Image (cartoon, rainbow, N blue to C red):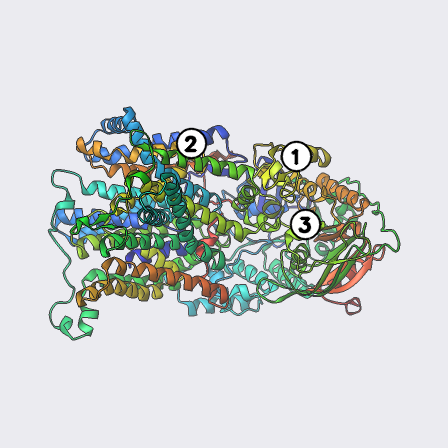
Amino acid sequence: MYAGIGELIAQRSGVMNLSIEGTMLIGGVTGFAVADITGSVWLALIAAAIAGTLMSAILAFLAVGLRVSQILTGLGLLIFGTGLSSFFGLVGENPIARRPPTTSIEPFFTGGIADIPLLGPILFSHDFVVYGGWVITFAAYVLLYRTDWGLRIRAVGTDPASAEASGVSVSWVRSLSVLAGGGLAGTGGAYLSVGLVKAWQDGLTAGAGWLAFAIVIAVRWRPLLLLAAAFIFGASIRLGFTLQVVGADVSPELLSMIPYALAIVAVLYAAASSSRNVTEPKALGFPFFREER
Amino acid sequence: MILPSNLAVEKKVAPSLWFSASLPILSVLASLVLAAVPLLLVGESPLEVYRVMAKASAGSVAALTDTLTEATPILLTGLAAVIAFRAKVWNIGAEGQLLVGAIAAAGVGLVLPEGTSPLIAIIGMMLSGVVAGAVFASLAAVPLATWNANEIVMTLMLNFIALSFVNYLIWGSSSLWRDDGFAAFPRGKLIPEVFRLPELTGRLNAGFVIAVLAAVVFAWFMRFTTWGYEYSVVGDSRTTARYAGIGERRIVISTFLLSGAAAGLAGAVLISGTVGGLEPRSLAVGIGFSGILAAGLGRMSPLGLIPAAAFVSALASTGPDLQRIGVAPPITIALQGLILVVVAAGQFFLEYRVVIISKDVPELQGKEGAPSTTPS
Amino acid sequence: MTAEPATLAAEMTGISKSFFGEFVLHSVDLDVRPGEVHAILGENGAGKSVLCSILAGLYRADSGAIEIAGERVELHSPHDGLAAGVGMVYQEFRLVDDLTVTENVVLGDPRNPGRINWTEARGRVAAAAEQHGIDTDPRAYVGDLTVGEQQRIEILKLLYREVDLLILDEPTAVLTPAEVRVLFETIEGLRRAGHGIVLISHKIKELRAIADRVTVMRLGHRVGTFDMDTVTDDELSELMVGKEVVTSEVPSRPSAGASPAFEVEDLTVLGDYGGVAVDSFAMTVHPGEIVGIAAIAGNGQHELAEALAGLRRAASGTIRLRISGELETLTDITTATVRERVEMGIAHIPEDRRHAGIAPGLGVPENLALKSYWHAPLSKRSIIARGAMQKLERALRDDYDIRGGSRKLPASVLSGGNIQKLILARELSRAPDLVIASYPTRGLDLGAVANVREILYRQLDDGSAIVLFSEDLDELFLMSHRLLVLFDGKVMAEFRHGDYNREVIGALMAGRSAEEQG
């Protein structure tokens, strides 16, 4: 979800960040290493955010500053991030890839409230990072639709020439959006390594970044819908585990396809319906196509 | 652009041909310098690492043939990327198309009776790989042409689906492709030895020839057929293609299918060549992305791709030797990414130049962080 | 020159600018006083818009100095321009269609609070609109507004940003006469309030009504600056076009009684958003005849040209062409594809020559082959003959005097005039029966304009029929045997060469009949 919101902001400003998976991995390894050394979850998340921002600074400089291909740069950074995270994971006598976690993220609510049947597990059983994600989604909504910056981001994403003529610096808005997106993706990666998996392993994100990328396009850049979609996709991943636990006779390999297949259906649906329905709110246009210069 | 205020960026009239040709080499050198940073951070000597890498990939005849062997599938997925990207069709699903091609080729290899003529069997496997890759690509090509559905997302998601499916065939079911001999730790069943591509020298097999041929044929196709001409126009300007009455949709779809076919062929060459069976751990190792890297390094030229693929393969195949001197192999992956980034960045210097604006008054005023994008 | 007031609203000295190595401005000076309307007059391609874009900060000059309100400034972006109090309404509006009026007006304003209260913002925008007498709905999406309304929003936006100097680039080109009157009232009000106004135009008559001074430009040079009272229309006109030898010879007429080469009946074409763009259009063109289409931008001529070329489907009606060799019969080509029409002998000189007319990244030979590559000698059985392509290039370069570029370089390096000659060479060397020419001389320098007209006249002698779209009434008057006036997709009237009357046709283009005009 962090990664999704990050990507959404970047794309709304008209930049496609394909390196998101690599950024998450860098965030993941940084976060885990920092948690390992300092024992502080907070420091881990902050360090991961900084690492993610640094990664996307390269993208911002190249794709926005030098205007070179966002696709090639993004893919290059993706490969770079994958390799570098794996490299750092294996460094030293006792590489962190083989270490147990020294710290983890505790549920935010303890006792009472989390024990309420049904509602408890759904709403109150999570750690603060999850609640942070909800908050950030709403914050992104407010940012985009209720602030000066959001207005600039939306304008730059749909019509950079007009935005520039209005005195908005297209490069500046895009760069900052990409940086923010990278920071969020880094945080998302750290949450995976420190919070969920509680270990560092190669390719830990297993396509989560790509899924985030797909969801952003499938929900057609609407932050609140992204929240809903993130739940659905989370549930579809869970569905696999649940079915196995129940003992259904379906192979886990097939079940692991569900989120990706779902993403394809969602993207197809969004694409097919958008070409039929031109009365849709135009503010949610295609930042992605306009960016081509 | 955030530049000092007396500098401005200007579009070049035409790129310098000399610079265009030397860009890949400059990029590689720049990347090697940049990659020294993480190496120094963990206390390794970059020079030593690069020396080992050079030796491992090209230090002996055996090393060299190994490098070319590994270059074969990269050359084909690179061709897939070149074909698609030149037409501005963003197929990044070579990984998945390769896997599906491998499934089909392995299927054919396993089904045919062992007495079949090896030539026919090999041709059958190659063809099935090509067709399967193209069909799998059509799952993204048709929605792109019909609804303008984002092909990047589609091909990416299809990559994951293809991988899950291969895993399912080997681990999750008792399919034709699975070797039940290792029940606890299942593997892909090997095709009969006679159906393997003949080896030329060392491990290098005829697949390399097929791959080089494919690149050369495509280069010829592009330059000397009407399809190739239409393809160049579509890649250059879709508006012009429409104006000239070139069926844009037809070109986009055929490009996408051809791209998928090249990736599918890569899968078939692996099955019939070095891998021998549907083995996820040997097939799904990022060859699709290495292909994109090779395409970028070869500056999207089908012929430039050939040395570029060899170079990428050289980088990728040095892992074990690095391990021996105690350096974590993934640094080569990071290096690959870095090279792609730097090559992409190099495009800037091909298309633009930085000029110094002459001024009547030397002192600078109005320092704004605000950049000036100058549409031209 | 009259005595200068204490502070000029803006002063530009020695401004030069080149694009792609071609000079578009040669050391141009300009000064604007507060409370005056300063017109910049010149032909297309004279450098008017570029000069003003530099003053607004959109482009950077290669050399020269700018002072605004007495202060020397460095403008790196429109942001700097606005901060210095200069704003420009570009010819192609710079409004974000997908945002509302309010969002567009406040976009980029440094005074915006971090968090915007939209109710309050709407209030402020409405108040500003009220104050300047501009009628608007702050909630409407800009994309839904008419062109005239959008222009008012552009002006409102600049006033909201409190600029002292407004630049309007060809503001009347897209307006109906009634809207022009409203615009001029607004400008008058701004002048009285002490704003400096720069008005770009190529229409002398219009400037009479509103301008105080005028700077005439020609081919990137400043010819001179005059008080409007001291200079006559004829003098201005001569200054603007220079000592041009006007090729006034009327092209040869079609022989009497010749049967039509091209017929359109009851043609209806839809626009991009499904509305009717061309409504029951009809015309007939004879061999050796030029029929001109006169219309203000956005009245269906774009869609009409596309429909004739086969790029846009006809919703109803018929299009018929006499294919050479077949003497008296017309072939129905209403549903023919672009490629089929090319084969039948239709040539098309497109509006956007750089992005539709050529494939900018391919070489000159490839571009010349664009409409014939599928035939021998350029290809046989789908195999391209490179040698034949190069032979074609050598022949056409000579015939049509295409200069610049080389076999290895992309066609985009050619100048505008040479790109147009390349397109003409490709289209006309196929001996077409019908030529659809959209804005064939737009933005070209005078030499190239004469050249292009010459080539088109030559084509008439060979018996082609020509449909000419142009935004330049003088060109239409000069070149067309007959002229159709198009308004809102409908034909308002037809005129013959010799009967052309600027006032009457101008009124019709604006949707009013001659009687109404009074």
Q: Residues within 10 Å of mark 1 (few under 14, many from 20)?
A: many
| Three-letter code, disc 2 | Leu
| Secondary-structure class at tag 1 | helix
Marks 3 and 1 sit apart, C-alpha to C-alpha, by 20 Å
Give me the residue at 78% from left, 59% from top: C284
The label on residue B23 is 2
Count the labels in the image. Answer: 3
The quarter in which the C terminus of chain C is drawn is bottom right
Q: Is residue C38 above or below residue C223?
A: below
* Mark 3, other Cα within 10 Å: few <14 / some 14–19 / many ≥20: many
- Report which residue position mark 3 lands on: C342
Residues at discs 2 and 1 both on one chain: no
- Tell me the number on the disc at residue C393: 1
Residue at 17% across / 39% down in the picture?
A: A91
The amino acid beneath tag 3 is Val
* Residue that appears at 56% across and 59% down: C155
Q: Secondary structure at mark 2?
A: helix
> Label 2 is found on which chain of the structure?
B
Residue type indicated by callout 1: Glu
Residue furthest front in the image? B115
| Left or right: B183, with C443 as reference point | left
Asked if residue C239 shows in the view, the reply is no
C-alpha span from label 3 to label 2:
41 Å
Q: Position of residue B61 (x, y in %)?
A: 29, 24
